[in-house]
Image (tube, helix red, strand yellow):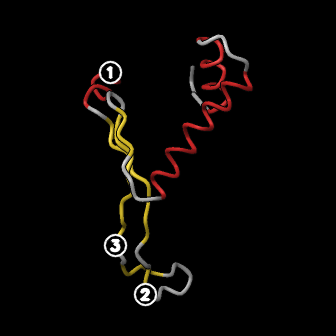
Amino acid sequence: MEVLNKKELTRVVSEQHNLTKKESAEIVDLLFDTMSVALQDGAKVDIAGFGKFEVKTRAARTGINPQTKEPIQIPATKIPGFKASKSLKDMVR
């Protein structure tokens, strides 16, 4: 398996738990929606044995406009971050 996308994940859940693809798609969607809302609200999502998702703040900084070469101010932004657990790192190695 080269890529595990949402469709493939839905198929695996469906096969392993004897569910219809529609039921497993609803479960997968619910999982991702719940995680997204939690991150949007500023919470951390910590899944034991897998990793931790959290919102990180990227500080404001000065950049350069590539067309005019003039300095520009880039405002602070929030970005999602992921830190893999030790067991996931060991499994991948």
**Please, what is the three-letter code of the amino acid marked with disc 2?**
Pro
Q: Nearer the viewer, residue 71 or 49?
A: 49
Q: Element type at marker 2?
A: strand
Q: Element type at marker 1?
A: helix
Residue 32 lies in quadrant: top right
Mark pair 2, 1: CA separation: 44 Å
In the image, which disc is placed on residue 91? 1
Q: Is residue 30 above or below residue 1?
A: below
Q: Residue at x 53, y 44 (%)?
A: 34
Q: Residue at x 49, y 44 (%)?
A: 35
Relative image position of residue 22 (x, y in whole percent): 74, 26
Mark 2 or mark 1, which is nearer to you? 1
Q: Residue at x 37, y 34 (%)?
A: 47
In the image, which disc is placed on residue 24? none
Mark pair 3, 2: CA separation: 16 Å
In the image, which disc is placed on residue 59? 3
Mark 3 or mark 2, which is nearer to you? 3
Q: Element type at marker 3?
A: loop
Quick one: label 2, few (<14), some, or many (20+) residues within 10 Å?
few
**Please, what is the three-letter code of the amino acid marked with disc 1?**
Met
Relative image position of residue 74 (x, y in whole percent): 44, 79
Quick one: label 1, few (<14), some, or many (20+) residues within 10 Å?
few
Residue of label 2: 71
Q: Nearer the viewer, residue 68 or 12?
A: 12
Task: Please report contact status of discs 3 and 2: CB closer than 8 Å, yes or no.
Answer: no
Q: Which quarter of the rendering shows the N terminus?
A: top right
**First in residue order: circle 2 vs circle 1:** 2
**First in residue order: circle 3 vs circle 1:** 3
Residue 2 lies in quadrant: top right
**First in residue order: circle 3 vs circle 2:** 3
